[in-house]
Amino acid sequence: MREVPHDSIRRPHPERRPLSNAEIEQHLERAVVALKSLQKPDGHWCGELEGDSILQSEYLLMKWILGQERLPMGDGRPAQTLLRIVDYLRGQQRADGGWGAYPGSPSDLSASVKAYFCLKLFGDSPEAAHMKKARAIVRHLGGAERCNSFTKFYLAGLGQISWNAVPAIAPEIVFLPKSFYFHLDKVSAWSRVMILPLTIVSTKRHTRELPVTLGIGELFVDHEARHQLSMRDGAPPFWTNFFARVDRALKWLHGRGGTPWRHAAIVRAFDWLEAHAGEGGIGAIFPSMVYWQVVLHALGYERSHPLVVRAERELDRMLVEIGAGADAPMRVQPCLSPVWDTGIALYALADCGFDNFDPKVARAAEWLVAKECRVAGDWMANLDAPAAPSGWFFQYDNAQFPDCDDTAMVVMALMRAGGDANRAAAGRGARWLLAMQNDDGGWAAFDRTSDRRILEYVPFADHNAMQDPSCPDITGRVLECFAWHGLTKDHAAVAAGIAFIRGRQEPEGCFFGRWGVNYIYGTWQAVIGPIRCGVARDEDWILRAGRWMKSIQKPDGSFGESAESYENPALKGQGPSTASQTAWAAMVLQEIYGPDDEDLRRAISWLCHTQLDRAAANDPISNPDGDPAGSWRETEFTGTGFPRIFYLRYHLYRLYFPTMAIGRYLAALGRGEQGRRLVATGERAALGL
């Protein structure tokens, strides 16, 4: 089960004949039917969220650290279930022998080391051809000693490197005063839920010693460097030296038992983790949920303990079977995305003219309202003044961590669904968003915060997301949300948000995409919100964004951008065509140039021509994911977790974003359910359509 070469993916070949508006309406109707068919009985949507090979590797390595590699799963499934994950991991190997971050990416050293280690642990011979190729690429990339810090925690936990090669994270950080630069409230929420368990892991240094025959000594080039900390690349020399000295001091202190407050610090860290270990798991994201199980094991908790049972159950919810049959391969999701998917699906249906009178819309809205956060979570820590709890999270359960991106999307969807309860919840969410604005005028994901660049230089910050500063894409979406509440550019918060976005425009006219790939996503989010809040479409900075978008359109009308643009900005707007990115670009063109723009028409036409018909949907070669007729085929990863590190393939992006784009286009022409409604009520002119 080898990965299909990126440039050989079978794609539909679009016809080039023009489509009538009536034909485009038919394509939209098929998309709406497909989208509604995927709704769960209780009203929500949840598509698969696919990551790269490290999810399989780290899950398997965790099982070895816990000594569970030959034991039944926590839910009673046999131990052979792990071999199904191994099978999928083996099939992700590239032609050059390595494993990478997304289809078409270069092989990644850390991902390749972890995958090789897993395959060897589960019985693949080092002399097998695929293992020789893997070993060669690892050594070519510099050897296992050059892995990132989060990989080294696994290698140390299985005795392959010294704990001295792992960045020290002292648990005493829980006692640092709020004024301290490196305070836990000042790092990103996802870093917080990873750092705190790692303070206990790196202090306890729980190690499972393996037989030499299962080790990976053959992957190291410099065996002396194997047991030494290597500082991360790219940090200024001063900070590299500074943090190297801090690390040495912390390890010297560890050798002497730590500070007098070490035990109390571990207790405080554990209490925080336990308090955040709700039904969704700590942070409801894969890394922290894995580290939590290692913490419980290192502290001596039996597998039958309720905390361990719940931790296993929550993580194993993320296992996905690929295909049918008891031996079908399995992969691991990084988290679950029901609130995100439901909010966008509902917003897309609103663009197609459906509101609370539609039973499926009503059920979706009711489900979302029930997910509103009404408790004071970690986000309270950085506010200047108390704010009433509200907001929405990404997953099924994660009440401590509502985020601005999900909240903005859900609030817009609820406002447009209509109904008193929906609008009341949307109003609470909008007021919460106002309280979360940063001093620079922008919005971040989880916390009200500031840009603290030095945090990115600490040795364990090589996931490139130690902090969570304002970004143009979230700021643009929040402004779009405020527009549905009647806020305009004359409102102080909106004006500050617009100024923040303008200050982040790239020389070419585009905007960086923090949460989607990449400049197409960022530009889509950055310009629509300001325009909806009253910025004129003919302002110079808006037109520069439009010209850039037009400049990257392909002759067939489509758009596409690879995640490689994060590594090489010269590749902005370049990559394989995708349905989701073409939809984002189409919405930008319509917002700036209006529905009569010929380039917009070409983008909409490409979406219609590449839509799966019944024959294509039933073809397992062109549609291996089993998407319904009316959806689209998209193999690329167009979502972003950590830029330059971790990318995502949202399996519903290829359906609800094209549906949204085509729905908006037809509405602006007075066609489709939404267009006819706007014409009948006179709202079309009020919306500038």
Image (cartoon, rainbow, N blue to C red):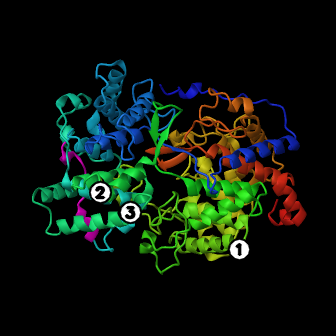
1 or 2: mark nearer the eye: 2
Please tell me which residue is depicted at 73% across the width and 29% down the height of the picture.
615
SS at mark 1 in the image: helix
**Mark 2 secondary-structure assignment:** loop
Determine crowd level at label 3: few under 14, some 14-19, many 20+ residues with C-alpha closer than 10 A: many
Residue hosting label 1: 420
Give the residues drawn in magenta, as a range: 162-175
Farthest-out residue, left? 256
Which of discs 3 and 2 lies nearer the camera? The answer is 2
Label at residue 305: 2
Q: Amino acid at mark 1?
A: Asp
Q: Is residue 178 left or right of residue 604?
A: left
Three-letter amino acid code of the residue under disc 2: His
* The one of 188 and 590 positioned closer to us in this rendering: 188
Residue tagged by mark 3?
187
Taking the spot 62% from the left edge, 57% from the top edge, the residue there is 42
The foreground one among 329 and 213 is 329
Mark yes or no: residue 535 visible: no
Where residue 147 appears, as percent x and y from the top left, is 31, 40
Q: Is residue 163 magenta?
A: yes
Q: Residue furthest right?
A: 680
Above or below — where is 486 with respect to 216? below
Quick one: label 1, few (<14), some, or many (20+) residues within 10 Å? few
Which amino acid type is shown beneath numbered disc 3?
Val
Q: How many marks?
A: 3
